[in-house]
Image (cartoon, rainbow, N blue to C red):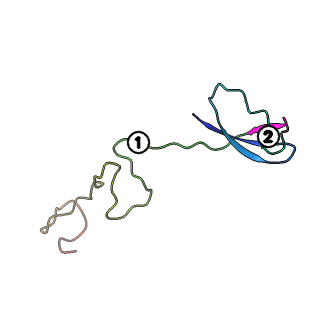
Amino acid sequence: MPSYDYRCKKCDHVFERFQRITAAPEATCPECQSDETQRLISGGTFHLKGGGWYASDYGGSGRTGTHGTQPPAAAACPPEGCGSCAEPADA
């Protein structure tokens, strides 16, 4: 059930209500009992679920995915060199 923020136009009290989407907006301020309330628009939240999403935007070694798997590592050239990159083999 979503939560909605309200502000009383009379006393500026801000309060929150858990309501169904189809429910009518709250009409009474719990602070001053005024019927001059206004539903506020606030940012929603979402969660990325499933494989391939990481809990953090910050990279670094040791970062794990949502299921405890390590992100794919960059392929390293073999000691003798791969011939497809400009890096010397002993770099």
* Residue 50 in picture, x, y percent from top left: 36, 41
Rendered view: 4 above or below 75: above
Which residue is painted at 41% across and 53% down in the image? 55
Mark seen at residue 29:
2
- Which residues, given as a range, are shown in magenta? 34-39
Q: Earlier in the sequence, mark 1 or mark 2?
A: 2
Which residue is painted at 59% across and 42% down in the image? 44
* Classed neighbour count for the residue bearing mark 1: other residues with Cα under 10 Å, few (<14), some (14–19), many (≥20): few
Question: Is 46 placed left or right of 30 in the picture?
Answer: left
Q: Is residue 45 magenta?
A: no
Question: Is 28 placed left or right of 65 in the picture?
Answer: right
Question: Is 61 placed left or right of 21 in the picture?
Answer: left
Measure how far apart labels 1 and 2 are at the Cα level: 37 Å
What's the amino acid at mark 2? Cys
What is the number of callouts on the image?
2
Q: Quadrant of residue 22?
A: top right
Mark 1, residue position? 49
